[in-house]
Amino acid sequence: MSQDDVTLVTGATGFVGAAVARALHRAGHRLRLTTRPGSDQRNLSGLPAEIVPLDLADPATFAPALQGCRHLFHVAADYRLWVPDEAAMRRVNIDGSAALFRAAAAAGVERSVYTSSVAALGLNPSGAPADETTPIRPEHHLGAYKKSKYDAEQAVRALAAAGQNIVIVNPSTPIGPGDIKPTPTGQMVRDAANGRMPAYVDTGLNIVHVDDVAQGHLLALEKGRSGESYILGGENLMLRELLALIATQTGRKPPTLRLPIAPLMPIAWVMEQIANITGKTPLMTPEILAMARKKMFFTSARAQATLGYQPRPAAAAVADALTWLRAEGLLA
């Protein structure tokens, strides 16, 4: 393979990574996709690509995967809202990412796109949409995942400042086809579509179609500035509004019971203690509830003005997610 036509995508078996790989294929890129042993590879079905092993916890796998690549899309991450071992997540999301980009520089990779997250960004206390420059406060980064993504983005920024060509993108909350694991948001969509969410908490999210996030990655490769970050978001909705969208499209009644967060805290604490013993992911934790107190609203104005990014309405993302769930036999 020549260095002119190989694009490596990490995390291509995952929700966002698979969407990025599909978008790259449509754009004519010659793909090399990474997997870990035991990964569910259904999202790679039908994609003409070379499949290679890569484990962010094992830097010895980096150089063979990167050999002969012109571009790198680093999408892989340990994405869990609760982990029994925070250090293991940090080794993957921070140390593994920094080591991968150093290996990319050594391999002669021309340009890279790093998939960060809005979890790494600040929030406006007023609930107004935040952007890439919103000040970051310690209370914004509750939980191991948010902390690891913030620190990972800072490490990547340092590499870009030192001269490596890396563009950063910050997806918000993607919804759409191919969420096979599923992500926490994907599980919520499944539960709501199947009538298993009779209540909600008063929180806000920025909902975006996963294919728009993927297209934003390609635009970042083409038009983004090295060391600059771009929010790839969509529509800001209260959780009750998202659940109402899902209910409307599935012929169900939207939930009307709003749960206050404070009385749930003791229950969440007990659930977390049980999870610490069993290792099974809890339904909620005090940190998850603390995050739910905030309106996680964002604006993609920079990506729209600079990259030409054009996200579709949240209703379209919900519709495509439900179509895929029906096709997979996952709706009652």
Image: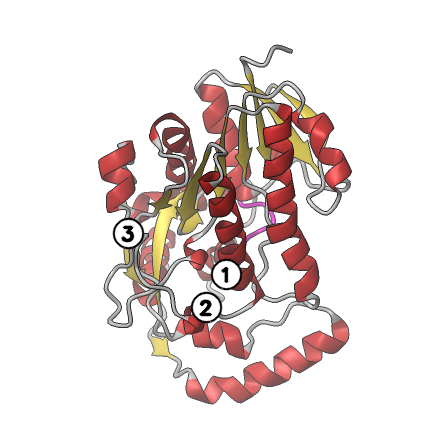
Q: Amino acid at mark 2?
A: Met
Location of residue 277 (image quadrant): bottom right
Location of residue 237 (image quadrant): bottom left
Looking at the image, tell me whether mark 1 or mark 3 is earlier in sequence order: 1
Residue at mark 1 to residue at mark 2: CA–CA distance? 6 Å
Tell me where residue 23 appears, x and y as whole percent. 45, 27
Which residue is depicted at the point 51% across and 23% down?
110
Magenta extent: 177-184
Relative vertical location of residue 268 with respect to residue 153 in this rendering, above or below: below
The residue tagged 2 is 197
In the image, is 146 to the left or to the right of 199?
A: right
Which residue is depicted at the point 39% across and 83% down?
260
Determine if residue 200 is in view.
no
Residue at mark 2 to residue at mark 3: CA–CA distance? 22 Å
Which residue is depicted at the point 32% across and 63% down?
135
Tell me where residue 175 appears, x and y as whole percent. 43, 48
Determine if residue 218 is in view.
yes
Query: In terms of secondary structure, where does tag 2 sit?
Result: loop
From the viewer's side, name the closer residue of 100 and 201.
Answer: 100
* Residue 191, numbered label: 1
Q: Are marks 1 and 2 in contact (CB under 8 Å)?
A: yes
Q: Amino acid at mark 1?
A: Asp
Query: In terms of secondary structure, where does tag 3 sit?
Result: strand
The residue tagged 3 is 235
Looking at the image, tell me whether mark 2 or mark 3 is earlier in sequence order: 2
In the image, is 232 to the left or to the right of 156?
A: left
Residue 81 highlighted magenta (yes or no): no
From the viewer's side, name the closer residue of 147 and 18.
Answer: 147
Q: Nearer the viewer, mark 1 or mark 3?
A: 3
For disc 2, the neighbor class at 10 Å (few under 14, some 14 to 19, many from 20) is: some
Relative vertical location of residue 138 with respect to residue 90 in this rendering, above or below: below
